[in-house]
Image (cartoon, coloured by chain):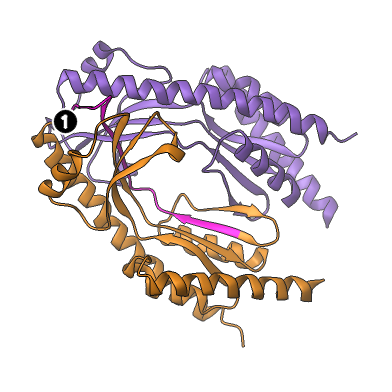
Chain colours: A orange, B purple
Amino acid sequence: MKRNTKNSFESYKQRNLQKLQEALECHTVDTEVISLLERINSDERFVTTSSCSGRIVLLSLPRLGDKKEAFFIGCWHHTPTIDDLKAALKKYSMGQLWLLAQPPIFHIAARDLDSARLLLTIGFEAGFKLSGIKTLQKHYLVELLSTERLDMPLGKDGIIYTDEVLLRFLLETAETVIIRSKEKLQRLDQKLRYYLKNEERD
Amino acid sequence: MKRNTKNSFESYKQRNLQKLQEALECHTVDTEVISLLERINSDERFVTTSSCSGRIVLLSLPRLGDKKEAFFIGCWHHTPTIDDLKAALKKYSMGQLWLLAQPPIFHIAARDLDSARLLLTIGFEAGFKLSGIKTLQKHYLVELLSTERLDMPLGKDGIIYTDEVLLRFLLETAETVIIRSKEKLQRLDQKLRYYLKNEERD
């Protein structure tokens, strides 16, 4: 039974590595997390299934929480300039308008419960305080998620309630989220180096 | 060994129920979640350790993420009026100023892994999509957390960048977070009734 579980994880890992390889070839993976993904995937106990290094998003949606109908007006992995933002805002016409700054997120499947526990420890120590185990089915899916964020409604029904002074202030604040996100990625890298080295299997 | 774990959970549960009783006597528990807490605690496999029904918070903090130094200028479990908000804003003088609308959150210890898995299922089905298992030590601590939120910077260094029109719009949006939070609590109650009844032990 144990052997089957191990084989099952190995084939699951191979499928996910194949998908990652395809995404790398299409340049759809954030360059800032590639070395982190490689570090995690080099350990036989883990495989990454999705990730984002942190981003700033401008989106419209019909109503709160209606993610399926959300339309991405703008998406940046760095801080956009005020001109970038104003140009994107011209595309807004209906629904709710939100500016989001989102922290880094990683989804990682772990082979067994002890490995999932280790990932949680690494995540919390790196400051990914919203981390948790999301599923306990065939594999153990761990989400590493940091806390810094900005979720701000800017307008509704085509009307924008923010002026340029406020937009500049929001961009400045969003930039601090992005800066903190980059610091968190470095801390995560340090913790992975430390724990995976000390836990290395022969 | 199994017997010890069971005894250990039972005494841990008794200590937490005692703390909850004290909090109830001091009226420091949100009245809107009391029946939910009772439903969860009536099952021998679970004990609640903390909770919030969702709230609107006005706080100042020296810098992003510096929660330890955060100062609560205002906190409401309903939507404040514009006059409530303006009165609270007068207390702001330094640091970053944020308006938050936070969804419901529950921390629940589960006796064993299967019980933790069941809680996760209940949470996800009730729409608490940020739920996860936070610790896998002696007990299994599950966090049930919903997604709707507003995290909006309003000012810094004593300067407020928002006018009354925008504040009214923000309160209106914050109110939709609170309304969705109340709906989520009802869905959680329904799911708890369904699953705990069907899984009831003799």
Name the chain under label 1.
A
Q: Is residue B61 left or right of residue B156?
A: right
Task: Report if residue A149 lies within the magenta region.
Answer: yes
Q: Is residue B131 left or right of residue B68?
A: right
- Compare residues A116 and A80 and report the one nearer the observer: A80
Around disc 1, counting alpha carbons within 10 Å, would you say few (fewer than 14), some (14 to 19), or many (20 or more)? Answer: some
Residue at x 80%, y 29% (from the top left corner)? B197
Q: Quadrant of the N terminus of chain A?
A: bottom right
Q: Position of residue B60 (x, y in %)?
A: 25, 34
Secondary structure under tag 1 reads: loop
Residue B29 in view: no
Q: Position of residue A12 (x, y in %)?
A: 63, 70
Task: Report the amino acid beneath label 1.
Answer: Thr
Residue A28 in view: yes
Span colored in magenta:
A141-161
Q: Which residue is most to the right?
A: B202
Q: Position of residue A153 (x, y in %)?
A: 28, 32
Image height of B74 relative to B3, above or below? above
Instruction: Read off the residue under disc 1.
Output: A162
